[in-house]
């Protein structure tokens, strides 16, 4: 089944990123879903006006506008292969009544390579909402969207003569699996109406699938504010939200804000937004009056002091009518987390995002039919000066689907070069090529869920934006596979994370690959560095490495970037036998996940 992955229009000129070309192509894309949180319905006091669990098939009529039998069905299937591996419900808590039937449009199963889909599933009865001027449709769904997919509820109040559309899933990322409870306000069509009809509509072209169950029409609550799309992004990071930022590369100011949405039937007054990151970082923004159905943005540019540490942002919307303790206050609160580190730079927020919100998929060497290889890349902004702009290694988060024996290569690429389709690695300020040797993935890497690939020597860069890149091995048999974790929790700008099919095209990922930079510092006086001491230097037979870190690892790499020694940090002096090492320069790297220290020493027999 073909999946067309389109690079969205990139406004690079206004973003300070050098010029580029857009390409469109059809590629086979295989997305592995690691986890997707199940969204629970918000507890509320409400009246259920009508419900249907699809247990009685005769209550539904099926039709399509394409005359090719691409229809909805009522299914009880538990297959994991429905809808191009969208799969049936995973429901350990039995919150969905899928066992007695659910509505299914399996676009992949009934579709054809040149066909289109426009199918309807209509409730044959009528629904009386005459006593309820404000009503909401609730539903359980499991869905994967593609670029041609439209998922719509349609409502009629004139016995089907006309239908009013209520599209859903417009905010969903393509190829991502969602299993959740959804709500849509249908007051404009059904509120106060005595003869309401309802139908489900799927428009597509050989896509994935939409599964729907447990439909309800409920009374819309008077007051239901919601906190939407919280963000915190460096003002000069062109909209990119980094999960981890080294303290030396923090922006001078940050854009902080979000959106306040009134899903209730009544107006909210004196609405305010509070953003609290702890550690004395709290901001209040006036939102004012919000009418029913309105969404109002809030926020400002702030200059927070951000020492090293974790920042758990809580974005809370309240008003005169809806305060903490109100029945629906749970969804008044949003979250956005980030971490300030000493040396780890990560676009993704895996391990930083709240666990209940974390959405992780993977892409990799077997995602595309590319005979010449694929480059996966994240953009990073360096602003610490040459002393701090030192890239020691790249860490790649991987899934267990990765196979030992696969080869990869990492590099740093200038953004101008990247978008001009010249994908050669750059040369740093010292004339070193910012490229590793090929690295063979080990079983230990797969077990650890990450690969660390060192550059032959620390790469020193000027202040600018760069792509940290991973070249995956070409393997037509798909026996050597690397699957890179892809954080879909925070929607990123199209240029933040990129995919380049060598000799073919460049695509936007729109999310955040787990391709992280481990950064060191040049010019530290060893006597002033409490974390790392290396002696004697030069060394003939034994070198002693001393650290006061309580956890982490010490690695020694040669000039080719090969790890020649590896030791767990134990907080005391560790002796390494260098008798078997050839004469030359070596680099000691100390890391604990947030701090990276480097020190060079010479072996001289």
Image (cartoon, helix red, strand yellow):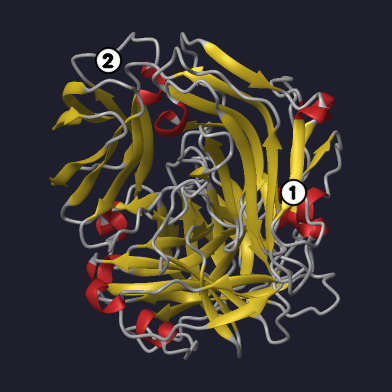
The vertical placement of 117 against 437, above or below, is above
Q: Residue at x 63, y 72 (%)?
A: 4
Reading the chain from its start, which is encountered first: label 2 or label 1?
1
Q: Residues within 10 Å of mark 2 (few under 14, many from 20)?
A: many
Q: How many marks?
A: 2
- Secondary structure of the residue carrying numbered label 2: loop
Q: Residue at x 77, y 52 (%)?
A: 83
Q: Residue at x 45, y 33 (%)?
A: 189
Q: Quick check: 350 left or right of 384?
A: right
Quadrant in which the C terminus is drawn: bottom right
Residue 75 in the image: x percent, y percent? Answer: 83, 37
Residue 586 in the image: x percent, y percent? Answer: 51, 73
Quadrant in which the N terminus is drawn: bottom right
* Viewer-nearest residue: 43 or 453: 43
Q: Residue at x 47, y 89 (%)?
A: 421
Q: Quick check: 345 left or right of 524?
A: right
Q: Quick check: 341 left or right of 41?
A: left
* Viewer-nearest residue: 596 or 525: 596
**Snapshot quadrant of residue 282:** top left
The vertical placement of 561 against 351, above or below, is below
* Viewer-nearest residue: 482 or 48: 48
The vertical placement of 76 against 300, above or below, is above
**Snapshot quadrant of residue 535:** bottom left
Residue 24 in the image: x percent, y percent? Answer: 54, 81
Q: Circle 1 sits on which residue?
A: 63
- Secondary structure of the residue carrying numbered label 1: strand
**Snapshot quadrant of residue 191:** top left
Q: CA distance from mark 2 to mark 1?
A: 44 Å
Q: Determine which of the numbered discs, if any, sits on residue 547 in the image.
A: none
Res 275 visible:
yes
* Viewer-nearest residue: 281 or 27: 27
Q: Determine which of the numbered discs, if any, sits on residue 322 in the image.
A: 2
């Amino acid at each position: 089944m073909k999946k067309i992955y389109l690079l969205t229009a990139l406004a690079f000129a206004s973003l300070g990123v050098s010029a580029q070309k857009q390409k469109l192509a059809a590629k086979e894309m295989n997305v592995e879903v690691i986890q997707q949180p199940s969204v629970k319905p918000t507890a509320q006091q409400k009246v259920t006006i009508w419900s249907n669990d699809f247990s009685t098939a005769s209550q539904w009529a099926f039709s399509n506008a394409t005359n090719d039998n691409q229809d909805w069905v009522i299914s009880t299937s538990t297959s994991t292969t429905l809808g191009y591996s969208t799969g049936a419900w995973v429901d350990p808590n039995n919150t969905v009544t899928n066992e007695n039937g659910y509505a299914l449009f399996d676009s992949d199963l009934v579709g054809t390579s040149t066909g289109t889909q426009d199918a309807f599933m209509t409730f044959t009865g009528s629904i009386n909402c005459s006593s309820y001027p404000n009503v909401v449709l609730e539903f359980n769904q499991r869905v994967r969207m593609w670029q041609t997919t439209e998922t719509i509820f349609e409502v009629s109040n004139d016995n089907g003569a006309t239908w009013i559309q209520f599209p859903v899933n417009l905010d969903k990322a393509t190829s991502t699996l969602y299993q959740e409870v959804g709500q849509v306000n249908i007051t404009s069509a059904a509120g106060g109406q005595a003869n309401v009809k309802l139908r489900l509509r799927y428009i597509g072209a050989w896509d994935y699938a939409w599964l729907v169950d447990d439909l309800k029409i409920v009374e819309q609550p008077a007051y239901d504010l919601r906190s939407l799309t919280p963000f915190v992004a460096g003002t000069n990071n062109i909209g990119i939200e980094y999960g981890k930022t080294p303290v030396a590369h923090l922006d001078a100011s940050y854009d902080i804000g979000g959106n306040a949405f009134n899903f209730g039937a009544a107006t909210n007054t004196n609405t305010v937004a509070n953003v609290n990151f702890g550690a004395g970082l709290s901001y209040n923004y006036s939102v004012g009056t919000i009418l029913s159905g309105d969404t109002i943005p809030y926020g400002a540019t702030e200059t927070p002091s951000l020492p090293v540490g974790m920042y758990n942002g809580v974005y809370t919307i309240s008003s005169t009518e809806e305060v903490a303790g109100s029945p629906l206050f749970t969804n008044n609160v949003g979250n956005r987390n980030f971490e300030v580190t000493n040396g780890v730079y990560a676009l993704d927020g895996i391990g930083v995002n709240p666990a209940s919100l974390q959405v992780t998929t993977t892409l990799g060497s077997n995602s595309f039919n590319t005979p010449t290889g694929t480059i996966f890349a994240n953009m990073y902004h360096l602003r610490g000066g040459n002393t701090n702009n030192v890239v020691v290694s790249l860490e790649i988060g991987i899934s267990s689907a990765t196979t030992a024996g696969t080869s990869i290569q990492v590099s740093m690429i200038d953004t101008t070069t990247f978008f001009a389709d010249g994908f050669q690695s750059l040369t740093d300020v010292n004339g070193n090529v910012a490229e590793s040797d090929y690295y063979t993935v080990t079983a230990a890497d797969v077990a650890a869920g990450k690969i660390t690939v060192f550059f032959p020597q620390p790469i020193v860069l000027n202040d600018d934006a760069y792509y940290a890149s991973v070249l995956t091995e070409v393997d037509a048999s798909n026996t050597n596979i690397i699957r890179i974790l892809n954080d879909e929790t925070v929607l990123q700008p199209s240029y933040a994370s990129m995919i380049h099919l060598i000799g073919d095209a460049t695509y936007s990922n729109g999310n955040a690959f787990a391709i992280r930079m481990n950064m060191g510092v040049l010019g530290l006086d060893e006597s002033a560095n409490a974390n790392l001491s290396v002696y004697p230097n030069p060394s003939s037979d034994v070198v002693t490495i001393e650290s006061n870190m309580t956890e982490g690892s010490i690695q020694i790499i040669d000039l080719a970037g090969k790890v020649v020694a590896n030791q767990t940090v134990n907080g005391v002096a560790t002796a390494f036998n260098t008798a078997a090492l050839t004469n030359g320069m070596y680099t000691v790297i100390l890391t604990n996940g947030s701090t990276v220290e480097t020190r060079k020493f010479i072996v001289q027999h």
